[in-house]
Amino acid sequence: MAIEERELHFARHNPLVAWRLFRVRRDDDGPLLSSPMYHDRDEPLWPRPARTATCYKDHAAPAAGCRCGIYGAIRGTLDSLPGYLLDTAHDDDPWAYAEVACSGRVFVDLRGVRAERAELVRIALDEDCWLDEDALGEAGAALSTRYGVQVAGLSDAPDWLTTNLRSEGKPPEQATLDLDTLDFRPG
């Protein structure tokens, strides 16, 4: 089934701001962010603040009609980031939301955005994912040092993101969205 999408372009100095869901994993340098939807816990890791999309097919990412790109949610799109936590309930690593600045080619559809590049802007940790306040504080400090961004609690995430609760992440099959109603202004 074809999905209606729009191709937009955003400069690095004037990006589209979106939010992502991450799992907080560890490597030799301490806590780091990782995409949550992969069953291989080692990929794709986010060891640096910025990332450029790739696709296993022979084209630049993101591309029209392909699901490649760096995913994010913007106000009004239908992916439920809290719902993806239910989709990945088997994964007991802590999770976080992160605000990202999307630039380059950016495709927008009813699910959200798929960007060519994304750079972390800030991280919001769920306080309830950690064993205690000390573990939360240590992880927050380490993530802030590693990525050079502010790390705070869930209260820093926008209400539209945290209240979009569904039993799974992706929208229902019959969902529709008028893309003309979305605000694509850069962050």
Image (cartoon, grey):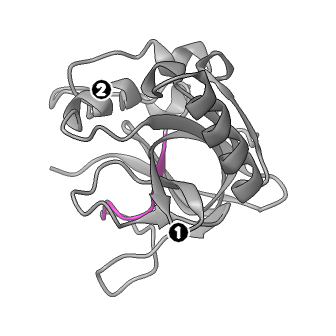
Residue found at the far bottom of this picture: 58
Query: Relative to 58, is 88 on the left or the right?
Result: left
Residue 119 placed where, x, y %? 67, 57
- For marks 1 and 2 on the same chain, the one whose residue lies earlier in the sequence: 1
The residue segment tinted magenta is 66-72
Task: Judge left or right: residue 48 versus residue 57.
Answer: right
Does residue 121 sit above or below 83 in this rendering? below
- Mark 1 vs mark 2, CA separation in Å: 30 Å
Whether residue 7 can be seen here:
no
Amino acid carrying mark 2 in the image? Gly
Which of the 4 image quadrants contains residue 155? top right
In the image, 94 versus 122, the foreground residue is: 94
Residue type marked 1: Asp
Residue identifier under label 1: 28
Q: Residue at x 28, y 47 (%)?
A: 3
Q: Is residue 122 magenta?
A: no
Check disc 1 and report its element: helix, strand or loop. loop
Q: Position of residue 154 (x, y in %)?
A: 59, 20
Residue at mark 2: 83
Relative height, residue 154 to residue 38 (above, below): above
Is 67 within the magenta? yes
Residue 59 drawn at (x, y percent): 39, 83
Task: Write down the quadrant of residue 47 in the picture.
Answer: bottom right
Mark 1 residue crowding within 10 angstroms, few (<14) / some (14–19) / many (20+): few
Q: Secondary structure at mark 2?
A: helix
Asked if disc 1 and disc 2 are in contact, CB closer than 8 Å, the reply is no
Question: Left of 128 or right of it: where is 159?
Answer: right
Q: What residue lies at 41% left-to-right and 53% top-to-bottom?
A: 35
From the image, state whether disc 1 or disc 2 is nearer to you: 1
